[in-house]
Image (cartoon, rainbow, N blue to C red):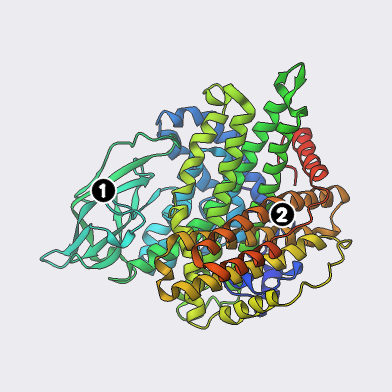
């Protein structure tokens, strides 16, 4: 990769300049206003970052695509070769400290690489598992000796990593794992017994991060080499999609793991498991955003090629609507990912590298944005699901055949709503974490709920002037935040501490919170782009218009569901009236905006923004 030794540039100066300023913490977007100048967007990439993105794209086209079909047939020797080449390019070293052969770049660059590798299809799963959840536990929690022994190999691609948390009987309930670890009589080894399920890279990984309970009780992480006595790899799973990646069981039968290979502290494995998943969710969001762009482009190519009634189907409004709405959703997805990258980079830049317990502080910085990481995972994976589904529909009957790639896109995307914690688990995490922050006094949620309720008791203010840029969207966003606060307040009032067990209510609240963050991110990105060329500004404005229309409708539906689950009688009537008042949006110009986006997608046969 050209110019990979740029760890100190990559937009770092801009981040560092603001590192000392206070920025909103996780979840505070629901009660605070964010100036457009404070968000990071794809338009802010440096030349060095763009070079890494270009090199990654070139790697996918030149190296991965020629052997993609062989990977689909489990010829995994090609996957190992590709990982070696990715290591030579520096693609495996982005998140690794320089002291261990890494580049130690920022999260924005890491997410850009994840996005650009995504068109590699199933190989992107191999890459992401290795560079994310298989490498980061060692970065964050490894001893100097462990890093010296293993991290350099992972960063170069000499070794490939895997992450072993899930078991046949425990998926979402990770702490319900039954794999055990007991100290050998001579005190030199831990002996691990159990089976790990659905392990990505299982067929060829050299190093596994394995979670087990010491003495059946203390949840702990271990670094387990493939060649250790008692380690067996199961057969390949027969999967619906991502067939070009390896997924196996890892079977541990008295596996002998040296005591020095305990990762972190005994009994503190949950910290590793859950903190690393925050980044994993974020990185998955970036990857599916890149995949959505690739899928949309294939839909546009087919729409230009395929004729019905002697006319390319891309000329028909029904097809153009799919492409326009897909582009708008991807615009929001992109805005979500890089806004969060900016939040994390700014927070992490404020931590001195020589601070005692640097990685503890680092992890706390990331954990503060667990809500946004979950939002990125859920929202972006569902954007890809929607785009892939519509691209199959654009292909018609051919989309159901293996003759065209739409069929594989459809199968491959499905796993993303299960990976890194199911979307349901992540949805529950969003309001659950927000309420815990409120209980700890970290976010003044109760005060803001009371203010929102009081505003509903006041007569509506005069209509805002909608002539200013994005005035309608800004007005809608401010009202939507009040809608969330009002229904969340009603839910807390009814259920109190028991709300944590009312999953249907929490899911509805999560949907409101997710759409608000996505809409705000898209809007802030477009506002910040005021100085861009007119064509780009027009496309951004169109994307905001199209996305806002759908988001407001979805928020209204979810808020009403939460209301019906949380109130009755006069209270319910008042709540529903408030939701109607707070979920209005003037979407004038919607059809021209949608058509502008669709035309741009078709003309360039790619995502246009």
Residue extending farthest to the left is 185
567 above or below 602? below
Q: Disc 1 marks which residue?
A: 227
The answer for how far apart the CA atoms under marks 2 and 1 are is 53 Å
Q: Position of residue 30 (x, y in %)?
A: 62, 70
Left or right: residue 369 versus residue 540 is left
Q: Position of residue 12 (x, y in %)?
A: 67, 67
Mark 2 or 1: the one toward you:
2
Q: Disc 2 marks which residue?
A: 548
Q: Residue at x 40, y 34 (%)?
A: 76
Element type at mark 2: helix
Q: Visible in this render: residue 242?
A: yes
Q: Which mark is residue 61?
A: none
What number of labels is visible? 2
Label 1 CA crowd tier, 10 Å (few <14, some 14–19, many 20+): few
Q: Position of residue 97 (x, y in %)?
A: 51, 64
Q: Visible in this render: residue 5?
A: no
Closer to us: 223 or 168: 168
Tell me which corner region of the image, top left, top right, bottom left or bottom right, holds residue 204.
Answer: top left
4 above or below 9? above
Q: Residue at x 53, y 59 (%)?
A: 508
Tell me which corner region of the image, top left, top right, bottom left or bottom right, holds residue 357.
Answer: bottom left
Do tag 2 and tag 1 residues touch (Cβ < 8 Å)?
A: no
Element type at mark 1: loop
Q: Position of residue 412 (x, y in %)?
A: 49, 37
Closer to us: 312 or 165: 312
């Amino acid at each position: 990769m050209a110019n990979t030794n740029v760890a100190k540039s990559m937009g770092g100066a801009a981040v560092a300049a603001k590192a000392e300023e206070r920025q909103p913490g996780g979840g505070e977007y629901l009660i605070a206003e964010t100036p457009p100048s404070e968000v990071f967007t794809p338009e802010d990439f440096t030349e060095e970052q763009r070079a890494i993105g270009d090199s990654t794209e070139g790697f996918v086209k030149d190296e991965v695509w020629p052997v993609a079909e062989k990977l689909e047939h489990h010829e995994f020797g090609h996957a190992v070769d590709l990982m070696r080449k990715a290591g030579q390019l520096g693609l495996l070293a982005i998140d690794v400290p320089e002291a261990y052969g890494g580049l130690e770049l920022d999260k924005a660059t890491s997410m850009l690489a994840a996005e650009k590798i995504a068109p590699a299809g199933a190989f992107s799963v191999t890459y992401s598992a290795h560079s994310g959840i298989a490498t980061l536990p060692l970065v964050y929690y490894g001893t100097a000796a462990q890093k010296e022994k293993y991290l350099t190999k992972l960063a170069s691609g000499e070794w490939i990593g895997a992450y072993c948390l899930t078991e046949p009987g425990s998926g979402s309930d990770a702490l319900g794992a039954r794999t055990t670890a007991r100290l050998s009589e001579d005190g030199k080894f831990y002996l691990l017994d159990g089976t790990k399920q659905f392990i990505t890279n299982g067929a060829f990984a050299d190093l596994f991060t394995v979670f087990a309970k010491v003495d059946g009780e203390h949840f702990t992480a271990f670094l387990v080499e493939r060649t250790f006595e008692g380690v067996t790899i199961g057969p390949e799973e027969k999967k619906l999609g991502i067939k070009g990646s390896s997924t196996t069981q890892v079977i541990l039968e008295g596996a002998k793991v040296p005591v020095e290979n305990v990762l972190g502290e005994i009994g503190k494995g949950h910290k590793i498991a859950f903190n690393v998943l925050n980044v994993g969710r974020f990185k998955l969001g970036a990857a599916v955003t890149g995949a959505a762009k690739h899928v949309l482009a294939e839909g546009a190519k087919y729409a230009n090629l395929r004729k019905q009634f002697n006319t390319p189907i891309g000329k028909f409004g029904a097809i153009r609507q799919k492409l326009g709405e897909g582009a708008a959703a991807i615009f929001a997805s992109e805005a979500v990912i890089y806004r969060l990258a900016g939040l994390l980079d700014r927070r992490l830049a404020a931590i001195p590298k020589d601070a005692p317990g640097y990685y503890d502080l680092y992890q706390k910085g990331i954990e503060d944005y667990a809500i946004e990481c979950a939002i990125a995972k859920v929202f972006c994976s569902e954007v890809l699901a929607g785009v892939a589904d519509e691209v199959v529909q654009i292909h018609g009957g051919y989309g159901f055949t293996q003759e065209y790639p739409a069929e594989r896109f459809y199968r491959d995307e499905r796993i993303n709503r299960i990976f890194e914690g199911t979307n349901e688990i992540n949805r529950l995490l969003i309001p659950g974490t927000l309420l815990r922050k409120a209980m700890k006094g970290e976010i003044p949620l109760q005060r803001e709920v009371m203010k929102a309720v009081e505003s509903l008791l006041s007569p509506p203010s005069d209509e805002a002037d909608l002539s200013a840029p994005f005035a309608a969207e800004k007005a809608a966003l401010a009202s939507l935040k009040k809608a969330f606060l009002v229904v969340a307040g009603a839910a807390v009032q009814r259920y109190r501490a028991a709300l944590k067990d009312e999953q249907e209510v929490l899911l509805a609240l999560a949907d409101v919170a997710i759409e608000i963050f996505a809409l705000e991110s898209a809007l802030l990105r477009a506002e910040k782009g005021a100085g861009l060329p007119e064509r780009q500004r027009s496309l951004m404005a169109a994307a905001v218009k199209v996305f806002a229309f759908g988001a407001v409708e979805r928020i209204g539906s979810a808020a009403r569901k939460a209301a019906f689950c949380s109130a009755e009688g006069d209270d319910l009537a008042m709540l529903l009236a408030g939701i109607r008042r707070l979920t209005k949006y003037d979407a004038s110009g919607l059809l021209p905006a949608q058509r502008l986006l669709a035309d741009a997608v078709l003309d360039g046969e790619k995502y246009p923004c």
